[in-house]
Amino acid sequence: MLSLLFAQLSFLAQTGPNEMLEGLKAIGAGLGYGLAAIGPGIGIGIVVGNAITAMARQPEAAGVARTTMFLGIAFTEALALIGFVVFILLLP
Amino acid sequence: MFGLTFPPISHLFEWPDFAFEGTPLAMNKTVLIYLVALALTLGLFLIAGARGKLVPTGVQTVAEGGIEFVESQIVSPTLGPSGARFLPLLTSMFFFVFFTNIFEVIPGVQFPANARMAMPALLAVMVWVIYNYQGFKSQGLAYIKNAIFPSGVPVALYILVAPIELLQVLIIRPASLAIRLWANMVAGHLLLVTFAVLSATLWDSTYVGAIAPFAMLVLMTGFEILVSFLQAFIFTILTAVYIDGAQRPH
């Protein structure tokens, strides 16, 4: 990935500084959102997986497990959404 | 790229004023959706309440179902039996957020009004005022102490925990509440626009190629109905959790 970045940089160095800035912004936005989505993706997987285990073990407590699961998802997802906001702000 | 012209983001979220231009009361599509959602929320409960019958029919069924849903899924798991006095606030909040979100998929409108930061931010500030007021009301000045210094933490760790907890109560909670609702709606709108633009472009050039993106568009529209419901639910349940957390020391 880094070599790709450097190839892009050497290509952009031949163009004007403004175009280079735009390109760097686009790279940063894409990488930023992609990196921000990794952690929450794993986290939501763990939250939902454990909630399903809890519901399967104790079906009578499914309501509590579901409510808590949504809360956990909401807190975990916030990180990915902040990444998304940065992505929107960085777009050229 | 590939003959595809994607509209710039400002074209998707900024609408021109069509009435009272240049005044603070200027109206655009977003404001209109807010007003319609407000009228729907008020109308639902006013009409249902005005003709209260023992055996509910029509609008009354919807209103009673909604109240029961909020009572059993949001209020009783978080606030418990003493939370009944927050039921009107949480029910109207749930329905208002849901109605403003659902305009994302209503044909002819297709804009989630909460994709503009104004209403999520206002609602978050309202929630912030409510839970802080409830904290001071039920705990007095001990609310500040309990909020900043949670019990069960080693004393040495308070150097680390206290600033985080203070920031959490003052800024992070309302900010994340507003950003969560807003960003979900922006992301959903962008997703639908992307597949709609793809379908239209491919229909123009190949006809057959439009099948795949159009199927995806239909699927995503169903997904966005789920998201607009879920975001209203999460917004309301987090409000209930914050109120509950402020009422008693944790």
Image (cartoon, grey):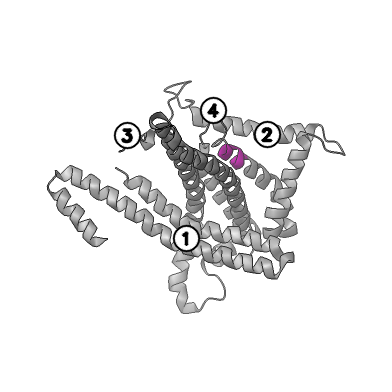
Give the labeled residue for mark 2. B42
Disc 3 designates what residue?
B3
The residue stretch that appears in magenta: B96-102
Task: State the residue at coordinates (47%, 60%).
Answer: A41
Q: Which of disc 2 and disc 4 is earlier in sequence?
A: 2
Image coordinates for residue A28, horizontal then vertical, percent: 29, 53
In the rendered structure, the answer to whether residue B192 lies left or right of residue B92 reads left
Left or right side of A82 for A16: left
Q: Nearer the viewer, mark 3 or mark 1?
A: 3
Gap in angstroms between the C-alphas marked 4 and 2: 23 Å
Q: Amino acid at mark 2?
A: Leu
Q: Secondary structure at mark 1?
A: helix
| Label 3 to label 1: alpha-carbon separation | 33 Å
Residue at 47%, 49% in the rendered image: B179
The numbered dot on residue A41 is: 1
- Residue B59 picture quarter: top right
Label 3 with label 2: CB-CB less than 8 Å: no
Residue at the far left in the pictured view: A14
Amino acid on which the number 1 mark rests in the picture = Gly
Residue type (three-letter) at the residue carrying disc 4: Gly
Query: In the rendered image, is residue B123 in sight?
Result: yes
Q: Nearer the viewer, mark 3 or mark 2?
A: 3
Image quarter hosting the C terminus of chain B: bottom right
